[in-house]
Amino acid sequence: MPKNILIVDDEPNHRLMLRLHLEQAGHRATEAVNGQQALERIAREAFDLILLDLQMDVMDGLTLLGELRRQGREIPVIVITAHGSVKTAVQAMKLGALDFLAKPVEVAELLRLVDQPQRVAAPPEIPRDYRFPGVSGSVMGKVLDLLAMVAPTDASVLILGESGTGKELVARSLHDNSPRAQGAFLAVNCAALSEHLVESELFGHEKGAFTSAAVAKPGKFELAEGGTLFLDEIGELPLALQPKLLRALQEKTFERVGGTRTLKADVRIVAATNRDLHEQVRAGAFREDLFFRLNVFPVRLPPLRERRDEIPLLLRYFIDKYAPRFNKLIKGWSDGFLKKLEIYSFPGNIRELENLVERSIILARGDVLDEQLLPDLSRASSVRDDASVDLKEREKQAIRQALAQTGGNKSKAADLLGISRRALHYKIKDYGLG
C-alpha cells in the first residue's frame, strides 16, 4: 500500500536518492532538512512513516524522536545515519524508533522495511487499571496478579492467547514494571519474515554475509541489551534457527550472520503465540528444550468474550485515545451501545473492539456514542464465519490438488503452493489430509 513518507536528512543528495527510490516504488515522499523543519511539516500533514537521519544541525534526530514522543505523535520512525553504532541505535530504539539502517543504505532492505506492517513510534499509555496489580475481581485481574509476581524477575515469560487479546500490550507491561524499564523494549514478529531475514533481524549480520548485506547491522539481541526482547508468534520460528535462539537464552551469547566474533546478550525474553506449542513439540516442529526454556512462566490471556466486564474500561481507554485525535469531545456511550458490544462474540478480541470504537468516534455527531454508530455485528459475524469456511474449503482443495500433482511429495507440493514445507505439514494435519 502506498505510504506518505517524510525524509529528514541534512544531505540533499541522500534525500534525493531516497525520494526517487520511494517514488519509484509507488510511495509519496516529502523532504525536511532538520528536526525543526520536520516538526513544521508534521504539524501540517499526516505521515505514515519517517526516515530520520541522526546527525543534523538545528535539531538532530534523537532530539526529534524525543519531541515526537513528548507530543504523543504516533508515527513509525526508521533511523538512517552514517554515524551508526549500537549505542546510538539503542538510544533511538528507546525513544521509539522501529529500526536502524546505516549509510550507504541498501535500497532493497529499505523498501522491505517501508513495506512491512509497522507499529507506532511511541506506544500509547497502558490504561491505569491495566498496570500491575491489575483489575481486582476480574478474569484479567487474576492474570495481572501473576504478571505482578514475575515482572520484577528476569524469568522468561510465554504469553498464550488468541490473536488480538493484547499479548504485546502485556509484554510491554512486563517490561515497564521490571528493573529493565529504562532499557529498550523491542519486538520481532517471527511469522512476518523469511528464515534468512528472521536470523538477521535477531542476531544481526556482518558486511558481505549475503548478497544484499552492503554494511554490517546489529540485530535485536544487541539493540535490546539491558532491556526486553519480545518474540511474537514464536511458534512460527523456523526449526533451523531454534538451536541458535536456545543458545542465546541459555548462554547469553550469539554470533552475527557471517560473523565469527562471539557477542554477549543481557536480554530478557518474552515470547507469545496463538499456537499449541505442546502439539508442535509432539509433531517435531518445535524443539522441546527451547519450549521448556521459554515456558518458565506461562500466562494465558483470556479472549474478550471471557472478560466482558472489562469492556467499559476498554471503551473509556479507547475513547481517551482516539477522540482527541479526531478533534471530538466524547463524554461516554449509551446503554444500547454497551449492550450491543456485550452480547457480541468478538472473534477479533480487543483489536476488533478498538477498531469499532475508532470507527464510531469518526462517525459520531454528538458527544455520546450510541448503537446506531455500530455496524450490524450479527451480520459481520455470519459473513466472517461463512468466508472462513469457504476459504478453508478452497485451501483444502488446493492442497489436495498439489499433493496429487506431485505424487504426494510434500516439498514439491509446498513449492507449488508457495508456502514452506513446515506450513504445509501443519495444514495437512489440521485438515486431516495426511
Image: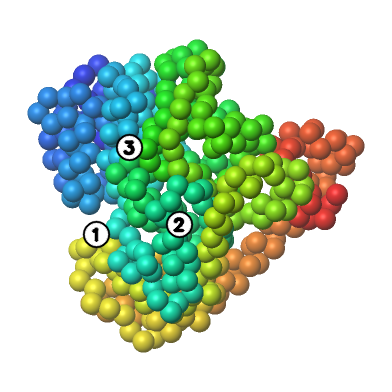
Q: Amino acid at mark 1?
A: Arg
In the rendered structure, find residue 93 and report the number of the disc placed on it: 3
Q: Please report contact status of discs 3 and 2: CB closer than 8 Å, yes or no.
A: no
Q: State the residue at coordinates (70%, 53%).
A: 278
Q: Tell me the CA gap for discs 2 and 1.
A: 35 Å
Secondary structure under tag 2 reads helix
Q: Tell me the CA gap for discs 3 and 2.
A: 24 Å
Secondary structure under tag 1 reads helix
Residue 284 screen position, x and y as percent: 76, 43
Residue 140 screen position, x and y as percent: 46, 70
Secondary structure under tag 3 reads helix
Disc 2 versus disc 1: nearer the observer: 2
Task: Note whether residue 400 is visible.
Answer: yes
Q: Earlier in the sequence, mark 3 or mark 1?
A: 3
Q: Please report contact status of discs 2 and 1: CB closer than 8 Å, yes or no.
A: no
Relative placement, left or right, of 266 versus 89 is: right
In the rendered structure, find residue 150 and report the number of the disc placed on it: 2
Q: State the residue at coordinates (39%, 86%).
A: 336
Q: Nearer the viewer, residue 334 or 181?
A: 181
Q: Is residue 367 above or below residue 88?
A: below
Q: State the residue at coordinates (60%, 45%).
A: 293
Relative placement, left or right, of 369 versus 413 is: left
